Image (cartoon, helix red, strand yellow):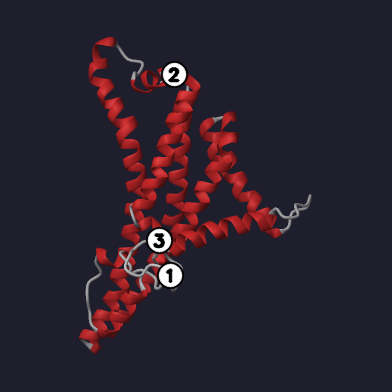
Amino acid sequence: MTGQSIVLAADVPFPPSVEDFYLPSIYPWGQHDLWFTKITVLVWVAVAAIIVFFLMSYRKPQLVPTKKQWLAESIYGFVRNNIAVDMIGPQGVRFAPYLTTLFMFILVNNFFGILPLVQLSPMSHIAFPAVLAAITYVMFIWVGIKKHGIAYFVHAVKPNAPVGILPLLIPIEIFSNFLVRPFSLAVRLFANMFAGHMLLLVFTLGGFAMINANALLAPISLLSWVLTIALTFLEFMVICLQAYVFTVLTASYVQGSLADEH
């Protein structure tokens, strides 16, 4: 939720719209351009927070870990053991650092969507999930080519099926593996974060709208704000789930590229 939305809501009721996601530039760096906005700051803060957290956690590693070291090791261990190794196999260990970074980056940026006074996730802009999906796309193709050579493209689109139905299945495999995968990966994350932000806006601003329209609607306004709090907890679960799903699917695509059979 933007600060502008809250201020205007106190004066006049208005419905939330897509324009709430397009914030003005931060003066004086942005001025007339839109390259430096609140979204830009949030992404930089997320990157800095992740780097500082892991550097501080492993600055002086101990045999009996401190709380910070234990938390950092638990996060890495979770991604390595429950995503990388489970999905890819023993080879997944070498992908664990990237998958951990991906998981943490999405998780922290998603968390901004429910953080008071911030309440806007950069992942609610399609550009950020699209870039992450593009990185995954390039990575699983590169891994496949490194493993199988140029034959990877034949390996990726030719299923083990009778020859007679291959003309039907191969176009489906091409469409599924090289078009649908990156698109669905980006849209799934974007749509969940976008919808979550809009839902919280509707209930929060709806409470202001009703109480401004008629004082007798104050109990309903209060109910609307209580539901906002309940939805915030639900959104927290969605935030964690979407970071997990994006990372799992990335690992799954890498596993498919490394597999000996399609």
> Residue 136 versus residue 207: which sits nearer the camera?
136
The residue that label 3 is drawn on is 121
The residue that label 1 is drawn on is 118
Is 125 rendered above or below residue 262? below
* Amino acid found under the numbered disc labelled 3: Ser
Residue 259 x/y as whole percent = 47, 23
Is 208 rendered above or below residue 119? below
Residue drawn at x 49%, y 24% as measured from the top left: 146
The reply to whether residue 115 is visible in this rendering is yes
Residue at the right extreme of this rendering: 63
Residue 152 x/y as whole percent = 41, 21
Left or right of 109 in this view: 16: left
Badge 3: residue crowd in 10 Å (few <14, some 14–19, many ≥20): many
Left or right of 55 in this view: 140: left
The reply to whether residue 217 is visible in this rendering is no
The quarter in which the N terminus is drawn is bottom left
Is 50 rendered above or below residue 86? below
* Amino acid found under the numbered disc labelled 2: Glu
The residue that label 2 is drawn on is 261
Residue at the bottom extreme of this rendering: 215
What is the spatial separation of the Cα atoms under label 3 and label 2, in whole angstroms?
A: 39 Å
Left or right of 20 in this view: 48: right
- Earlier-in-chain disc, 3 versus 2: 3
